[in-house]
Image: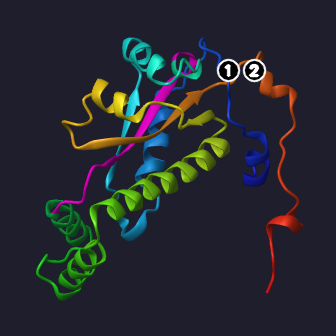
Amino acid sequence: MDVLEALNWRYAVKKFDPTKKLSVEQIDRIKKALQLTPTSMGLQLMKFVMVESKEIKKKITPIAYHQPQIEEASHLLIMCRKTDVKSEDIDSFIEEAAAVNELEVSHKSMQDYDKSLRVSLAIPEEQQKIWMDNQVYIALGNLMTVCAVEGIDACPMEGFDRKRLNEELGFNEQHLDAVVMFALGHRSAEDYRLKFKKVRRPLENLFQTI
């Protein structure tokens, strides 16, 4: 699909067809798209947890206020950020960047990059958390567009008890914090949202030229 046609086609699906599953190839493309998603400074201080287990979905349902998408969707993606920025996060990123660019970590450009990252992230922990939350939302926006172009139905979900989910799935021990969930699959013909047309504000209300 043309990207504008695809964006007009997509909507936040409220009822999925549980009999239709995404293929391995489709999930692989989703994963690769998320791997390529832009983030500030390229650090990608996040983890994407793909839930396929029916048992785990059932545990999540009450934590997400019994929204049917949790169990009806083919896959459920939990988009998490790290709880805080550690020195080793920067170390590992610089090592990877050096390897990809066939440079030594000691190369001046790598050392300058390392210093820039540490200076930029020398901010209070609360600001770090807000910044990392925002990086997950950048990935979410990218993912919604990718799904639309790929013809995959989806629904971003913020309606869940973040603290309970972190405890239930053991994210605290992994130093992860769930930010948003993303249900993927195929829309049901019975989804009530299909009756409604997409509503967006007129271009002249959204844009200003100065």
Residue at 49 percent of width and 42 percent of height: 29
Q: Secondary structure at mark 2?
A: loop
Residue 38 relative to residue 144: left or right: left
Residue at 49 percent of width and 41 percent of height: 30
Q: Are marks 1 and 2 in contact (CB under 8 Å)?
A: yes
Quadrant containing the C terminus is: bottom right
Residue type (three-letter) at the residue carrying disc 1 = Lys
Question: Which numbered disc covers residue 15?
Answer: 1
| Range covered by the magenta-colored residues | 71-86
Residue 105 visible within the image: yes
User: Which residue, as the protein is rendered here, is positioned at the far left?
Assistant: 106
The location of residue 122, given as percent across then percent down, is 25, 73
The location of residue 130, given as percent across then percent down, is 41, 58
Residue 118 relative to residue 148: left or right: left
Q: State whether residue 30 is above or below residue 209.
A: above
Q: Nearer the viewer, residue 202 or 91?
A: 202
Residue that label 2 marks: 191
